[in-house]
Image (spheres, rainbow, N blue to C red):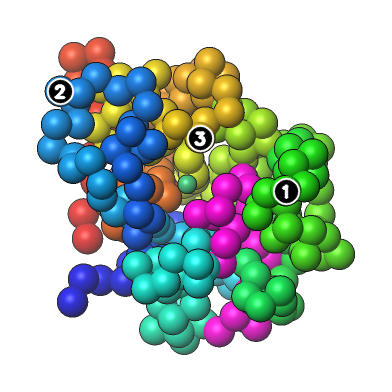
Amino acid sequence: MNPVSHSFSLGRFHLTSISDGAFPVTKNFFFANTPSHIVSHIPNHYHAPLNVLLIDTGTQKILIDAGLGSTFAPVAGKLVDHLKTIHVSPGDIQTVIITHGHLDHIGGLIHSKRPVFPQAQYVLSQEEWDVWESDPSSQEHNILLLLKNCLTLLPKDAEVFPGVRIIHTPGHTAGHLCVHVNSENNDLLIASDILNDPATLQHLPSHISAEMSPAKGLNTRRKFLKKAHDMSAMVFACHYPFPGLGYINKRKEKWIWVPHEL
Ligand SMILES: [Zn+2]
């Protein structure tokens, strides 16, 4: 059986990458603006990995996004079952940081119109809320509306918890967030959907076709990759092969992905 969770330490924090399963996509959807030779190994229809990160600071359990939820069961929506394998129940989650409002990141927040994580407070950027509030016919709007009473909307970069900082990284969506986790001089950067697949580091204008502003997305991607490299930070990428953990390195003036060794 494939592993469904991978735990590791970052300073005093205990982190776990958890698989939600996979996201059924077409190659055209997932690799817009990508030269075909870079992704010749990818079939036209395939399942993109979907990873979720749990940060346990010792006093807070913070989840970064929540996967697809039951809509795409049984290929996805496995987060809650996989949390149980590390003895975490939905009621233990105190904070959920929502990196952006796409369904593969928020579908798992609601089940039968009720919050899946009943004790949690939810953090979202104000700009991301504005995007979906202006689109009332979308599923994303309906899910976020059900959480409205427990949502904290943040207008700019902010520390959510000591050592856990959100960074506004527009492009994929207007209010997309990356997250910087720091404990005892160890750094981890959460890319969310700034990055779609290790192969496209060879061609940075590549993006998921749902990217709202590819020009801003490219700018954000460039800054993020340079920062991750300069800081020697571990990177977590939701759609990279499980566990989505690794480092950004440079070879012949191009960025490359160096997966974290399990
Ligand atoms: Zn995504």
Image height of 198 relative to 113, above or below: above
Q: Badge 1: how crowded within 10 Å, few (<14), some, or many (20+)?
A: few
Task: From this view, report whether residue 124 is shown above or below residue 167.
Answer: below
- Give neighbour class at mark 3: few <14, some 14-19, many 20+ (Cα, 10 Å): few
The residue drawn where x is 61% and y is 34% is 173
Q: Is mark 2 within 8 Å of ligand 1?
A: no
Label 3: element kind: loop
Do residues under tags 1 and 3 come within 8 Å of each other at their CB atoms?
no
Q: Is residue 111 above or below residue 231?
A: below
The disc label shown at residue 137, or none:
1
Q: Hey, what amino acid is under mark 3?
A: Ala
Q: Residues within 10 Å of mark 2 (few under 14, many from 20)?
A: few
Task: Tell me where the magenta segment starts and ends, as one range.
Answer: 89-108
Residue 37 numbered tag: 2
Q: Residue at x 79, y 39 (%)?
A: 134
Q: Are marks 2 and 3 in contact (CB under 8 Å)?
A: no
